[in-house]
Amino acid sequence: MSPGGDITPTTAGRHLREPWDGLRLPETGAFAYQRAGATFGMWVFLASEVLFFGALFLLYTVLRLEHATDFATAARETNIVYGTLNTALLLTSGLTAAIAAQASEQDGLRRLTLICLAATVLLGLAFLVVKGLEYREDIDKHLVPGADFALKAPATQLFFGFYWLSTSVHAIHLSTGVGLIARLIWREWRAPGFLLASPQVEVATLYWGFVDMVWIFLYPMLYLDGRSA
């Protein structure tokens, strides 16, 4: 503060950047509060997402109970090879994301953090490519609900309506996760050391874990039903 009582630009900028300074917290304490706040915010967001996908899964369960035979028939038309491959890709990406989250908290593991984050992005992009190939096959087989739908039983259109809705919404969430993690890599490249104990790494990988979890529920619903026989 200047002798005349004015706040200098440096002081003002500091308080804009670090509003917790007034609490007189040590630097480690301030970061802990920032980290806890960011993580809590993501958990609140994920809770709202759980409500959305929970309602979607409940809808599937009700329809599946009412049209068990038709849903089993429709599920056998999905490409289990693509579905299983994408499951393997996402499970592996979940592992790399978890390693990145842990490595970002340790000194000297910057390279491992970057490698795991990059691997997560690449695996996510591979998932989207495989899903695109699967969508093209579904379109060629006339498995899009409508006048040209290939299957005769009416309830099979309900199954594929759920299939297109749930997988497209999941793909949008996955694309968002890819963008979040790619942004972390870009920021670390611009400012080395950014990832060290950054709460953004934990937030992004927490979101990625949620996307993985949603697919774990979708996979048996869309690909395994009706194939046990």
Image (tube, rainbow, N blue to C red):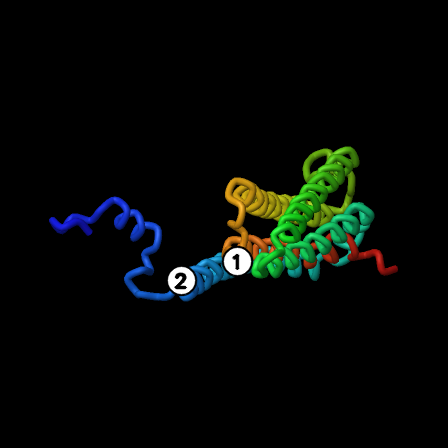
Q: Quadrant of the C terminus?
A: bottom right
Disc 1 residue crowd, few under 14, some 14–19, many 20+, Cα 10 Å: some
| Residue under the image location 11 percent in, 49 percent down | 4
Considering depth in this image, is 120 or 114 the residue closer to the camera?
114
Disc 2 residue crowd, few under 14, some 14–19, many 20+, Cα 10 Å: few
Amino acid beneath label 2: Glu
Q: Dot 2: what SS? A: helix
**Residue underneath mark 1:** 197
Pinpoint residue 97: horizontal percent, then vertical percent: 64, 55
Q: Are marks 2 and 1 in contact (CB under 8 Å)?
A: no
- Mark 2 or mark 1: whose residue is earlier in sequence: 2
Quarter of the figure with residue 209: bottom right
Q: Residue furthest front?
A: 3
Pinpoint residue 25: horizontal percent, then vertical percent: 35, 66
Above or below residue 104? Residue 154 is above
Considering depth in this image, is 192 or 30 the residue closer to the camera?
192
Considering depth in this image, is 108 or 203 the residue closer to the camera?
108
Amino acid beneath label 1: Ala
**Residue underneath mark 2:** 27
Pinpoint residue 207: horizontal percent, then vertical percent: 57, 55
Q: Residue furthest right?
A: 229
